[in-house]
Image: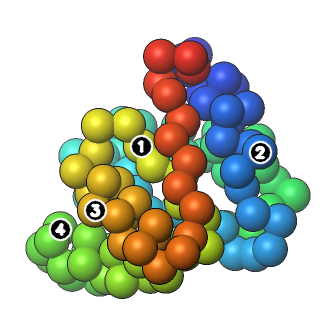
Amino acid sequence: RGPTPAYNAACSPHLSQHPPVVIATSIGKDPSHTATQWILDEFVAANSQLRFAIGITDFSYRELNAAAEASILFNSRSFIAFPGSTFSHLVKRKVLGNGGAFHDVEMASV
C-alpha cells in the first residue's frame, strides 16, 4: 500500500517506551487531510504496545494548532522529524537546545 511498514521499522528504535508518545500531525484534523488517515492509523496499529497522544483541532486556524503542538514538543526528550518539514526543523532546534535527542528518519531508505 505504501512505505508505511518500512517507515514504522525505521522509527521504531526511536520511540519511547515511556508513555505517551506524542504525534503532532495535520492528518485527520480537517477535510483536506483525511485522505492520508490510513498512514496514521497503520503507524499507531504497528506500534500498539505504546500509548499515543494525538492532537485534535480546537482552533479554526492551523497556525494556532501548530503553536499548541509546538509548545508540547519543545520540551520533548526525543523527537522524530518528518523530512523536509519546516515545522520539524523548528522543533528540532528547540529540542536539541533543551538537551533532547533528535532522530531524522530518511524517507529515501523507506
- Could you tell me which secondary element the residue under label 1 belongs to? loop
* Rendering quarter of residue 110: top right
At label 4, counting other C-alpha atoms closer than 10 Å, the crowd grade (few under 14, some 14-19, many 20 or more) is some
Quote the CA–CA distance across marks 2 and 3. Answer: 23 Å
Residue 106 x, y percent position in the rendering:
50, 28
The residue under label 4 is 62
The residue under label 3 is 90
Q: Which mark is residue 13?
A: 2
Left or right: where does residue 104 sit relative to residue 97?
right
Quote the CA–CA distance across marks 4 and 1. Answer: 18 Å
Q: Residue at x 25, y 78 (%)?
A: 67
Residue 76 x, y percent position in the rendering:
54, 75
Task: Please state which of residues 17 and 42 is positioned toward the viewer in this rendering.
Answer: 17
Asked if the residues shown at circle 2 and circle 3 are in contact, with their CB atoms under 8 angstroms apart, the answer is: no
Q: Amino acid at mark 1?
A: Phe
Camera-side mark, 4 or 1: 1
Q: Amino acid at mark 3?
A: Leu
Q: Earlier in the sequence, mark 1 or mark 3?
A: 1
Q: Residue at x 56, y 17 (%)?
A: 109
